[in-house]
Image (tube, coloured by chain):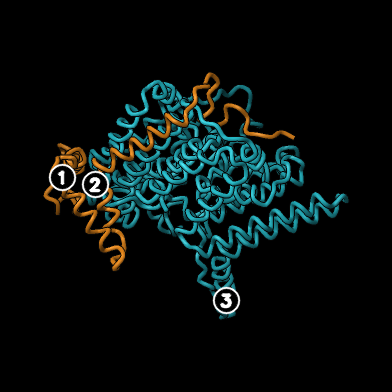
Chain colours: A cyan, B orange
Amino acid sequence: MLFPTLTFHVFFLLVFAANWLLRKAGEWRLILLLIASWVFYGAWDWRFVALLQASALINWGAARLILATPEARRRKFWVSIGVVLNLVILGFFKYFDFFAEQLTILLQSAGWERDVPLLGIILPVGVSFFTFQGMSYLIDVYQGKSKPAGLLELNVLMSFFPHLVAGPIVRPSHILPQLRERPHLTRQVAATSLILILWGVVKKAVIANELSVNLVDPVFASPATHSALELAVAAYGYAVQIYCDFSAYSDMAIGLAGLLGFRFPRNFNQPYRAATLQDFWRRWHISLSTWLRDYLYIAALGGSRQSMARTCFALFMTMVLGGLWHGASWNFIIWGTIHGAILVVERVWKSLKPSGIGTLPNWAGQLLTFHIVTVAWIFFRCKEFTTAKDYLSLLFSGTSGVQLASPWMVALILLGMACHFGPADAIQRLGRRAAALPALAFALLGTLTLLVVEGLLGEGVAPFIYFQF
Amino acid sequence: MHEGLPWGDSPVDFEDDDQPGIGWAALAIYGASAMLLFLNAHAILNWANQLELTDTTAPIVVTAENWYAQTGQFGLNQIVDSVKAVAQEARAADWPFSDAKAPTQAAQGG
């Protein structure tokens, strides 16, 4: 069930009404939200609802064992078991076939003609998101950063449909208290939530969809038939497409949760305004980057309170594993490696830079960072390393070819970039103004927006890019 | 132990906000849905056309087609149709200095 569809619209109308009718009903409201989330998830594949339940049960059980164990070593044992079980779920469904293929290649190169059997496993939508959510609960309970949750609360936390399949990766300590409070909704929160949803629909259904179908997909499918200029425009187009696609999902998730009485954290903050790659990761997919920082970079790899070499190694490995988190494919590992390597270079330069050398002006840093990110996106978008390499070499070879980058496509790219250079709190400002309108006037404006989106929509809405992760 | 999302970390955090909003939100959401029911029969028809055709879904598809025809008779499909026409023109527009056209544009006569 995709957000910007009629099916989801009807689904949400029912959930919204039931949620507020049950606002004083305590756990019954949580049961409603849980069942609604299972229906939402089951619309893809009912079988995986059981996986979701099993994942919640494992984390709830492991957390109970941690809390029931006074001895520190045994507590560490239980948290390790819990984390390993989460990784087994993730590894089996997401990485088994990839590593089996790599093993086959390795054996063949060593002269052993053995085929490691592939299982053809179907990837459950959002598995990376809900296993990370489960792990953060377990680790937070172990570290005393989160109070333990009941089985129902943990199920709702992990399954809650606004964030279930593509984030934001909400922290247990942020959401569990909200599950225990009686929900309330103010006019400004309602108006801002609705604007977030509408803006998300525009970004996804108009900008990302159109760029994907009419520019990015055809150019990346056969780069050799396009001119160098076209390849450059398509690379910019993909940078805008992936931002509009993913940030649209986050905006809609935050808006939907807001309408149900929940506060979700911001997940994007004008990322292409970043003046360094470190700054980029403070603005892009914030919930994942902070997750990787807290649980992988600091907790598992030691963070920055160690020697420079070990810090750089930790940083690099965090980004490589962050790349692998996106998918079982070499292109994601290469993408993570590029980011990791440049973050290391930034860190080393920051500590070794001679005092006489000034820093880049902000605009130059932004321009450089944007282009580094855009080049790295080429590796992210191409399934094969050789395709990405060919794309880059064609980009500088100056050939001519079919033209797809129409003024409409360029206008959409510029529109996608323009939202980076407005005020960072533009949505909240709009929300304040909209809250002053009568509800039906707001409804009329929302309706007109959606009618324009319907008119601009091409051949339906493609799935969100981050669903595959 | 710090519990709760820090204030200001969510885009829906407002300090000076105490006006109740459930009724306002309900009127906005259900009001817009009612308007869309009449003004966006395109979406209903598209949705129905994507259903797998069975004995159960066939009447739904027929109802959606009839609804689209009825709203069309009253001119209610006009807004979406007008935007579609403008969007079609915008997609087909070419650079003034260009002599090469995309195959899709050429096929559409753009």
Element at badge 2?
A: helix
Q: Where is residue A357 in the image (x, y as percent from the top left)?
A: 58, 24
Do circles 1 and 2 both sit on a common chain?
A: yes
Furthest residue in direction right, as rendered = A71
Q: Who comes first in sequence, dot 1 or dot 2?
A: 2
Q: Mark 2 points at which residue?
A: B41
Q: Nearer the viewer, residue B19 or A304?
A: B19
1 and 2 marks in contact (CB < 8 Å): yes
Give amino acid for label 1: Gly
Answer few, some or many: residues within 10 Å of disc 3's Cα (few below 14, many 20 plus, some between 14 and 19).
some
Chain that bears disc 1 = B
Judge from the rendering whether residue A293 lies leftward or rightward of residue A408; answer left or right: right
Q: Which of A195 and A318 is in front in this view?
A: A195
Chain that bears disc 2 = B
Q: Does residue A62 sit above or below A340 in this rendering?
A: below
> Which dot marks residue A116?
3
Q: Which of marks 2 and 3 is in front?
A: 2
Give amino acid for label 3: Val
Q: Distance between the residues labelled 1 and 2?
A: 8 Å
Q: Where is residue A459 in the image (x, y as percent from the top left)?
A: 27, 52
Answer few, some or many: residues within 10 Å of disc 1's Cα (few below 14, many 20 plus, some between 14 and 19).
some
Element at badge 3?
A: loop
Judge from the rendering whether residue B57 lies leftward or rightward of residue A129; answer left or right: left
